[in-house]
Amino acid sequence: MQKERRRNSSRVRTLVFAGLFLLSMVLFTGMVFAGSSVDEGRKICTTRKLGNCVSCHYLPDVESPGNVGPNLVESMKNYTPEDRAIVRQWIVDARKFNPETIMPPFGANKILNQKQIDAIVDYLYSLKKGGK
Ligand code: HEC
């Protein structure tokens, strides 16, 4: 009887450890993915064949960025987390805000896919926290 109870409690302890281990793996994977989406966004914005946002906008860590468009580090200071949809809309199709814009409609013209646009938005928001 005593032995049986001891065996059960060690089984419970094993289960609790396994549960905690799984939970920490899930959290860790989530963190890795959150980081990589910011990195992906940065890559798209600074790569000529992808978004090439830096041909018109200032972004950190690139040599001689363009200045036809606003400095996006400064722009992002005006956007709160609730404005995510607005920031996204700029990238999907800036004509919604300025019909005469020279900014390419990256989403509407399928220059970039939805996942890439989400990664860019994550990257732009990371600039608010002093990210690179
Ligand atoms: C050909 C030049 C050009 C390119 C390329 C370009 N933009 Fe723009 N963008 C502009 C201009 C100009 C504006 C200012 C608004 C206007 O006049 O349309 C703007 C505005 C914006 C805004 C709003 C800024 C604010 O102050 O509210 C965001 C956000 C933005 N661009 C993001 C991007 C991203 C991200 C990319 C790359 C995927 C990109 N832009 C590529 C020219 C460009």
Image (tube, rainbow, N blue to C red):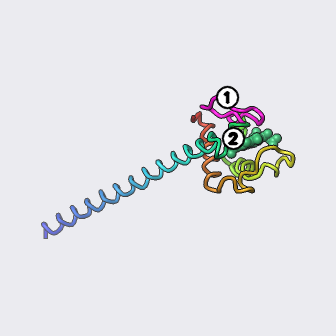
For the C terminus, give its image quadrant: top right
Report whether 69 appears left or right of 41. Answer: right
Q: Find residue 73 and report its horizontal and vertical position in percent.
A: 67, 34
Q: Is residue 22 above or below residue 128?
A: below
Could you tell me the amino acid type at mark 2?
A: Cys
Give me the residue at 42% from left, 55% from top: 26
Which structural element holds mark 1? loop
Q: Find residue 103 and report its horizontal and vertical position in percent.
A: 77, 44
Q: Find residue 117 and report its horizontal and vertical position in percent.
A: 65, 51
Q: How dense is the environment of label 1, judged by Cα within 10 Å: few (below 14), some, or many (20 and up)? A: few
Report whether 36 appears left or right of 120. Answer: left
For the N terminus, give its image quadrant: bottom left
Cβ of mark 2 under 8 Å from ligand 1: the answer is: yes
Give me the residue at 57% from left, 35% from top: 131
Q: Which residue is mark 1?
A: 64
Give me the residue at 73% from left, 52% from top: 92
Query: Which of disc 1 and disc 2 is earlier in sequence?
Result: 2
